[in-house]
Amino acid sequence: MIARLAVLLIVGLAWTATPPGTQARELPKLALPCAKCHGVDGISPHTTVPNLAGQKWRYLAQQLKNFRTAAKGDFGKSGLGGRRHPKMETMAEPMGDAEIEAFAIHYSILSCGAGTSVVLPMPRVATRCTVCHGHKGISPLGRVPNLAGQKQSYLVKQLAFFRDAGRGLGYGDEEARYHSMMDSQGQTLNDMNLYALARYYASLPCR
Ligand code: HEC
Ligand code: HEC
């Protein structure tokens, strides 16, 4: 029963449709306020701010919706996952669904950059992650993020959020995150594994 549920969930995550419209091309002007933190091309100049370029658009859209939900005071109350961050809640709160999808598509079609020069060997614990995040951190599922080439400190922070959530912690904090699939993954990671995973995925070429 549990195995069947997991399969259904994974099939659900894989569902991708053609991105709606091509209005993404007109986005650069709207995305100006985002550039300060996420970079003009979606490659962030800050270590704890994620790159958005080349990320799965359905995933990005879901994150903006999660921030918007949290801004309405609904964090932790509904859905598979939720996410809090004061700045991103302010950014997402006034957005409509169409705007959210346009932002998500805009960033997903940008090139993620050149990749890294030194790829680290895969830590053993990463074998648990490949079913959803792919063998080299490029996810085969539309609603699961690519991890390859993402900022290391950002990845550490996200894994720590999920680990806290899996232990029932962090729900009252102004920065927090949970997801029914990731909380159980995070819960069992010790600090050494957590840092090794973040270092490894950050070192992989993003495409
Ligand atoms: C003041 C800095 C700042 C600005 C401005 C900003 N962001 Fe963010 N954004 C962040 C930070 C920091 C995070 C990571 C939050 C966390 O640690 O959970 C983030 C996360 C995100 C995510 C989730 C990405 C992922 O990989 O999970 C999306 C999508 C996003 N921002 C889109 C936008 C868009 C679109 C705009 C402009 C409308 C914008 N952001 C403006 C700082 C900013
Ligand atoms: C059953 C599928 C599944 C497995 C297995 C899994 N993940 Fe995830 N992961 C997800 C989903 C779904 C999300 C998006 C969560 C959300 O929407 O907030 C995610 C999000 C993440 C994020 C946040 C990325 C970002 O850009 O913000 C990190 C980091 C992460 N996973 C690392 C891992 C690591 C490391 C492992 C192995 C120890 C792992 N995951 C195993 C499904 C999975």
Image (cartoon, rainbow, N blue to C red):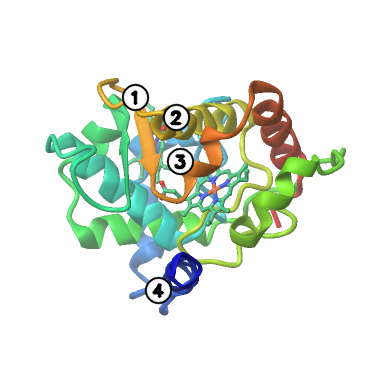
Mark 2 and mark 4 lie on one chain; the one further toward the N terminus is 4
Give x and y (percent) for residue 20.
34, 75
Dots 1 and 2: beta carbons under 8 Å?
A: yes
Q: On screen, 71 above or below 47?
A: below
Kind of residue sitting beneath label 3: Asp
Mark 1 and mark 4 lie on one chain; the one further toward the N terminus is 4
Dots 3 and 1: beta carbons under 8 Å?
A: no
- What is the C-alpha distance between the residues marked 2 and 4? 30 Å
- What is the C-alpha distance between the residues marked 1 and 4? 30 Å
Give x and y (percent) for residue 111.
61, 55
- In the image, which is nearer the foreground, mark 3 or mark 2? 3
Residue 161 is marked as 2
Mark 3 and mark 4 lie on one chain; the one further toward the N terminus is 4
Mark 3 and mark 1 lie on one chain; the one further toward the N terminus is 1
Q: Residue at x 45, y 65 (%)?
A: 2
Q: Residue at x 46, y 51 (%)?
A: 181
Q: Residue at x 34, y 68 (%)?
A: 23
Q: How many marks?
A: 4
Secondary structure of residue under mark 4: loop
User: Viewed as shown, does residue 192 lie left or right of 25?
Assistant: right
The answer to whether mark 1 is within 8 Å of ligand 1 is yes
- What is the C-alpha distance between the residues marked 1 and 2? 8 Å
- What is the C-alpha distance between the residues marked 3 and 4? 29 Å
- In the image, which is nearer the foreground, mark 2 or mark 4? 2
Q: Could you classify mark 4 by the number of other residues whose Cα lies within 10 Å: few (under 14), some (14-19), or many (20 or more)? A: few
Kind of residue sitting beneath label 1: Glu
Q: Nearer the viewer, residue 22 or 123?
A: 123
Kind of residue sitting beneath label 2: Phe
Secondary structure of residue under mark 2: helix
